[in-house]
Amino acid sequence: MLKKFLISAVVLTIIAAGAIFGWVYRLVVVEPGDEIQLENIRRILGKESQVYYSDGVTKLGVFFDTAHRQYVTFEEIPKNFVDALVASEDDRFFTHIGFDPLGIARA
């Protein structure tokens, strides 16, 4: 009886995980929506960051009001700069699938 219950629980868990994965895949890959459009991302990245007092209404100032940010594509970044960042953060960045189990275990 207990064995059947555990098997049923494992099967239902696998089915639920598969359904959640499929739903997230559909939202992100198949129908990502307007939020992920390249033009929208560039518009958001180029905005100035407004700073408010603790009341959330009174504007204190703006970050980057004299030095504006500029969106740069990956191809425009020098390879030496990318290699330096990767070497300082995660030397296996280009070889794992997005997260590094060995790095997580090490941390």
Image (cartoon, rainbow, N blue to C red):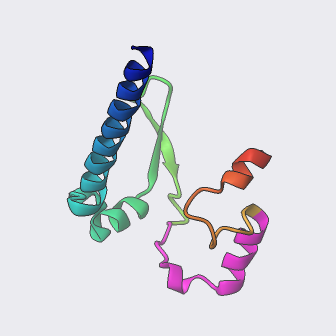
Pinpoint residue 96: horizontal percent, then vertical percent.
61, 66
Q: Quadrant of the N terminus?
A: top left
The answer to whether residue 98 is left or right of residue 34 is right
Report how many numbered discs are placed on residues in the image: 0
Question: Which residue occupies the extreme top position in the image?
Answer: 1
Pinpoint residue 46: horizontal percent, then vertical percent.
41, 64
Residue 4: image quadrant is: top left
In this rendering, the answer to whether 107 lies above or below 34 is above
Pinpoint residue 30: horizontal percent, then vertical percent.
22, 62
Residue 79: image quadrant is: bottom right
Q: Nearer the viewer, residue 101 or 80?
A: 101
In this rendering, the answer to whether 68 lies above or below 57 is below
Pinpoint residue 32: horizontal percent, then vertical percent.
25, 58
Residue range in magenta is: 69-88
The answer to whether residue 24 is left or right of residue 61 is left
Residue 45 counted in the magenta span: no
Identified at 31% across, 39% down, the residue is 15
Identified at 47% across, 79% down, the residue is 73
Identified at 79% across, 48% down, the residue is 106
Q: Quadrant of the C terminus?
A: top right
In this rendering, the answer to whether 89 lies above or below 75 is above
The answer to whether residue 48 is left or right of residue 81 is left
Q: Nearer the viewer, residue 77 or 3?
A: 3
Identified at 55% across, 65% down, the residue is 67
The dominant secondary structure in magenta is helix
